[in-house]
Image: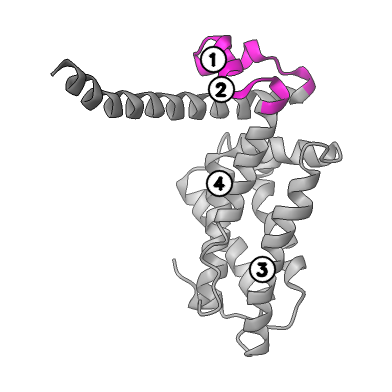
Amino acid sequence: MSELMNNSASPRTTASRGRIRRENEARILEAAERVFAETGLAGATMSQIAQAAGLPKANLHYYFGTKEQLYQAVLTAILELWLDATDAMLPESDPALALAGYVRAKMRHSRTRPFASRVFANELLSGAPYLTDYLEIDLKQRVEAKSRIIAGWISEGRMAALDPRHLFFMIWAMTQTYADFAVQIRAVMNVESLDDDAWEEATGEVISFVLRGCGITPAASAP
């Protein structure tokens, strides 16, 4: 009987440990985003990140090893989040809806994960020493795959002829500026922060720019 009870408890214990690990890793990554964004990799310490996460420093080393490995994990999580936003771009998709949805996702990330965007921007400005392989393989392959879909839309006459790669560059620039240069935007708009209406207006403007540039009627996009 004792053996049966121990065996039945084991899956629950394993599940609980897995949940705790996921929760702790999420807390650490969130805290690390902010610290790396504010101080850079060189200026950040594991002690600062541990304090921001509300966890012992030993936990950070247990889950991520070194500061550099944690930084790499933060960068990877950021790129995976952004790449996932392109999933709705399919050959059968309505270009207006697909592009508007992608812009909305990117704007939402700029609003809810501004520190993530700044960490990424700082890494690129430093020459991307921790992202070179990811950019040249994962990002490049994703952009190439989605560019083929956009090229298909163009060949079908569903949007204007353009280089899809430059379309992605422009969308990234327009959406990520709301995170990377938020202080500039707040100063020009004379506000302490953008409220819901301001974010919706900004999102609508970016969508309109993108769709008009693609020769698509903005009214065809989803709200």
Q: In front here: 139 or 44?
A: 139
Question: Image check: 141 left or right of 197?
Answer: right
Q: CA distance from mark 1 to mark 4?
A: 27 Å
Q: CA distance from mark 3 to mark 4?
A: 22 Å
Q: CA distance from mark 2 to mark 3?
A: 33 Å
Mark sitting on residue 109: 4
Mark sitting on residue 59: 1
Residue at 57% from the left image edge and 68% from the top image edge: 99
Residue at 80% from the left image edge and 42% from the top image edge: 124
Q: Is residue 97 magenta?
A: no
- The answer to whether marks 3 and 1 mark residues whose Cβ atoms lie closer than 8 Å is no
Predominant secondary structure in magenta?
helix
Task: Look at label 1 and name its amino acid.
Answer: Asn
**Magenta stretch?**
42-69
Q: In front here: 32 or 214?
A: 32
Looking at the image, which residue sits at the far left?
Answer: 1
Residue hosting label 3: 145
Looking at the image, which residue sits at the far right?
Answer: 127
